[in-house]
């Protein structure tokens, strides 16, 4: 719980910093997402109060952008690029393999909270297509056969 | 200032960073120090060199030796052989084809670079983007100085109009005209905005410019601010571009420190400062009105035009918005003059355009060519053609708003007007090559899937219309297409184009309409013959076991439907009625005995 108190204190500081800034809601949500890993309703309520806007406005923005998540994500977020360059080079097969290996649907998190699978927008590493990112680690020129080996590194 | 006898340029763009260039820099620095060369040789992390396929790329000057796909283990050899003993390490030098004996040692020798003309990318791969002095050494901020001390705002606008520069973000609207409109609006506060929300999948030129030459954008925005009478600027960048954001912020800080941003710039009384705003993953925010609403902190939904941003834009004030690549051209136009710029390219399409080549092509990367260059030259001369001896089928330009260009149009000259004339568009410059294995119906489905996901939902044609189109396409690729589907797609597409609120919706049907125009036979094969000519659509495939089968029984064990039967050491058979077309058998077969038809 003490950990959480710390996070809420951080949030209060962020709100204070952006309170008088034009268009401050987006930066506050972005920082809240970084602090908590997601922006659940109780966090949104605090932001609404702090910035003196309605909760519906905060919720509207939080649900509009794909970067904001209302639920926590897994420890490792596996994002397979479904940009055009990756897609024509077979990234859908990589994504399918990942989903069948972890036995969850794309967009979901494993029950143990370890992995989340996402289909991401173009990561801009088209020279390495097809590309997958696990947190900040980039895996390029992938084939579906490599997926089990890569996952094993994180399952340990 | 220290002088060095040699420079090692290591690409620090996103592509090369992903393939490990940061470790290379560390290793170079360690090895140079270990060999006592750290006072003689300087390691520079530059922006993108463009040839991402060959990454990580390292260039050693003064020779200009082009090393490609360098691994950490290779660094020691380059240091001890090339930098210590002066002998080029031939086996690490870039080769155009794997089997080729002769190596091309310098940039100018390489086919990928020879037909190119780098204006917007001039400093990418040449300077350290994190050091303002290097930008200044290559005439940086000279154009801003010239504008502030020698030209009136009206002079600047006239020069821009004369140059014929058109918006590089895709629309192709004349930049000078845009500035003229914004300058004409009277207000106590105006804004100048840079659209760096590069959402078109497969396009990464804006990111590369921000990563490789951020000061060119800052300088151009200050020039624009002076021309239209704005004292504040915003750069709206995708959050997916962390390196670009970091370098741009660093560049802004350095420019402030040097007095090139802030109050009384060059002692002329001109004030200008700028800020970064991050996107949060919404493609529609590339649309200018949506982008401004997002900077305001709201939902990034577009609003009808008029009023145009030049009249009422960000925070309800007159605003001018241009794209990153457009800005990157501006300092040179000011320095070299509009006549110089119009001498490049074709009439009405002056200058160059950057393209991101990707997909089924040998040289993936970033290329910049004069407008009017034949498409064939970009694909074959620069791009090196299609890998694995496959046949070229189409090139997709303009991303989810563009279209597919078939082989018979390969000889068109690339410019805004010719691409629009054949049903595609320039867009931001993504150029994805497809070969015979790509199904064009599935590609159309892929793009519709993208627009349906990214539609903001504000207007009905886009929210519901694109969804209906996607449903039809999904049926077709699953072998459930019906007569009349093609006509329905055409009617829906034309209506959405005419009635959607913003650019996203108005262009969303383009990938379908252009593939219907050039690859109608593929749609017909799916619908009437239940067959995918490219052998791509799983549900329309028939798996067959050939006489290469040794009867190992592995396939019959992995088949989830029990569709494969046969006795040990004899050729097995697939019951097509039971087959789920999952492809598991083909994946497992060790003898290549299973084929799909």
Image: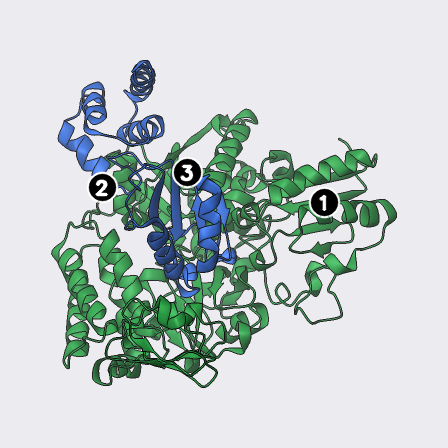
Could you say which quadrant of the image residue B36 lies in? Answer: top right
Hue used for the chain lettered B = green
Residue on which the image places disc 3: B225
Q: Percent position (x, y) of residue A143? A: 47, 60
Q: Percent position (x, y) of residue A108? A: 28, 45
Instruction: Residue B244: tell me if it is visible.
Output: yes
Output the chain of dot 3.
B
Quadrant (top left, top right, bottom left, bottom right) of the N terminus of chain B? top right
> As drawn, is B542 to the left or to the right of B92?
left
Q: Are marks 1 and 2 on the same chain?
A: no
Output the chain of dot 2.
A
Question: Furthest residue to the front?
Answer: B568
Secondary element type, mark 3: helix
Label 2 vs label 3: CA separation?
Answer: 31 Å
- Nearer the camera: disc 2 or disc 3: 2
Residue on which the image places disc 2: A64
Question: Furthest residue to the right?
Answer: B85
Label 1 packing within 10 angstroms: few (<14), some (14-19), many (20+): many
Residue on which the image places disc 1: B8
Q: Residue at x 60, y 48 (%)?
A: B123
Secondary element type, mark 2: helix
Of residues A69 and B94, which is closer to you in this image?
A69
Of residues B288 and B544, which is closer to you in this image?
B544
Of residues B550 and B269, which is closer to you in this image?
B550
Q: Percent position (x, y) of residue B540? A: 28, 77
Chain displayed in blue:
A
Label 1 vs label 2: CA separation?
Answer: 45 Å
> As drawn, is B349 to the left or to the right of B45?
left
């Amino acid at each position: 719980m003490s950990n959480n108190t710390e996070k809420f204190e951080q949030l209060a500081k962020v709100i204070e910093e952006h309170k008088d800034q034009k268009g401050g809601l987006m930066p506050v949500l972005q920082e809240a997402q970084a602090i908590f890993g997601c922006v659940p309703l109780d966090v949104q309520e605090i932001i609404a109060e702090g910035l003196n806007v309605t909760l519906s406005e905060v919720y509207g923005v939080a649900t509009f952008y794909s970067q904001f998540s209302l639920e926590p994500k897994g420890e490792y977020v596996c994002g397979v690029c479904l940009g055009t360059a990756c897609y024509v080079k077979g990234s859908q097969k990589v994504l399918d393999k990942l989903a069948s290996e972890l036995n969850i649907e794309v967009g979901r998190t494993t029950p143990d909270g370890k992995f989340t699978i996402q289909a991401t927008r173009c990561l801009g590493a088209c020279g390495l297509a097809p590309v997958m990112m696990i947190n900040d680690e980039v895996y390029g020129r992938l084939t579906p056969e490599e997926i089990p080996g890569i996952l094993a590194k994180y399952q340990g | 200032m220290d002088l060095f006898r040699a420079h090692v340029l290591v690409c620090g763009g996103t592509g090369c960073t992903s393939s490990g260039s940061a470790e290379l820099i560390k290793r170079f620095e360690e090895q140079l120090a270990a060999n006592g060369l750290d006072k003689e040789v300087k390691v520079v992390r530059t922006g993108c060199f463009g040839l991402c396929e060959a990454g990580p790329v390292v260039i050693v000057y003064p020779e200009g030796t082009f090393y490609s796909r360098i691994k950490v283990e290779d660094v020691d050899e380059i240091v001890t052989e090339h930098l210590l003993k002066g002998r080029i390490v031939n086996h690490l030098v870039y080769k155009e084809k794997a089997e080729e004996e002769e190596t091309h040692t310098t940039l100018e020798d390489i086919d990928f670079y020879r037909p190119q003309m780098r204006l917007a990318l001039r400093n990418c791969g040449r300077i350290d983007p994190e050091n303002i002095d290097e930008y200044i050494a290559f005439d940086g901020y000279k154009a801003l100085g010239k504008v502030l001390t020698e030209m009136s705002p009206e002079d600047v606008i006239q020069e821009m109009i004369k140059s014929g520069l058109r918006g590089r973000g895709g629309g192709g609207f004349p930049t000078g005209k845009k500035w003229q409109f914004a300058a004409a609006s009277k207000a106590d506060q105006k804004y100048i905005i840079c659209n760096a929300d590069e959402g078109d999948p497969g396009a990464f030129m804006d990111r590369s410019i921000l990563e490789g030459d951020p000061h060119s954008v800052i300088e151009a925005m200050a020039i624009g601010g002076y021309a239209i009478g704005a004292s504040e600027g915003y750069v709206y960048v995708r959050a997916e571009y962390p390196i670009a954001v970091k370098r741009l912020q660093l560049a802004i800080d350095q420019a402030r420190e040097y007095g090139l941003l802030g109050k009384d710039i060059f002692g002329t009384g001109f004030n200008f400062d700028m800020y970064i705003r991050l996107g949060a993953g919404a493609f529609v925010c590339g649309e200018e009105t949506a982008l401004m609403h997002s900077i305001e902190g709201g939902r990034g939904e577009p609003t009808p035009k008029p009023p145009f941003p030049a009249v009422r834009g960000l925070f309800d004030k007159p605003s001018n918005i241009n794209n990153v690549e457009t800005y990157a051209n501006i300092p040179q136009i000011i320095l070299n003059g509009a006549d110089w710029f119009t001498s490049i390219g074709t009439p009405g399409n002056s200058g160059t355009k950057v393209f991101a080549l990707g997909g089924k092509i040998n040289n993936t990367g970033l290329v910049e060519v004069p407008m009017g260059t034949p498409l064939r030259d970009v694909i074959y001369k620069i791009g090196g053609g299609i890998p694995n001896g496959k046949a070229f089928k189409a090139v997709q330009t303009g991303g989810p708003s563009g279209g597919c260009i078939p082989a018979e149009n390969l000889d068109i000259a690339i410019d805004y007007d010719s691409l629009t004339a054949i049903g595609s568009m320039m867009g931001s410059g993504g150029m994805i090559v497809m070969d015979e294995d790509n199904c064009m119906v599935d590609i159309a489905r892929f793009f519709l899937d993208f627009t349906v996901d990214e539609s903001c939902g504000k207007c009905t044609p886009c929210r519901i219309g694109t969804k209906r189109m996607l449903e039809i396409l999904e049926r077709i690729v699953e072998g459930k297409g019906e007569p009349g589907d093609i006509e329905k797609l055409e009617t829906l597409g034309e209506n959405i184009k005419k009635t959607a609120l913003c650019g996203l919706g108005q262009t969303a049907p383009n990938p379908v309409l252009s593939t219907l125009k050039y690859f109608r036979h593929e749609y017909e094969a799916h619908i009437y013959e239940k067959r995918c000519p490219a052998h791509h659509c799983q549900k329309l495939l028939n798996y067959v076991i050939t006489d290469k089968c040794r009867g190992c029984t592995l396939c019959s064990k992995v088949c989830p439907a029990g569709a494969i039967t046969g006795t040990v050491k004899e050729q097995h058979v697939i019951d097509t009625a039971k087959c789920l077309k999952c492809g598991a058998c083909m994946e497992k077969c060790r003898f290549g005995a299973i084929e799909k038809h």
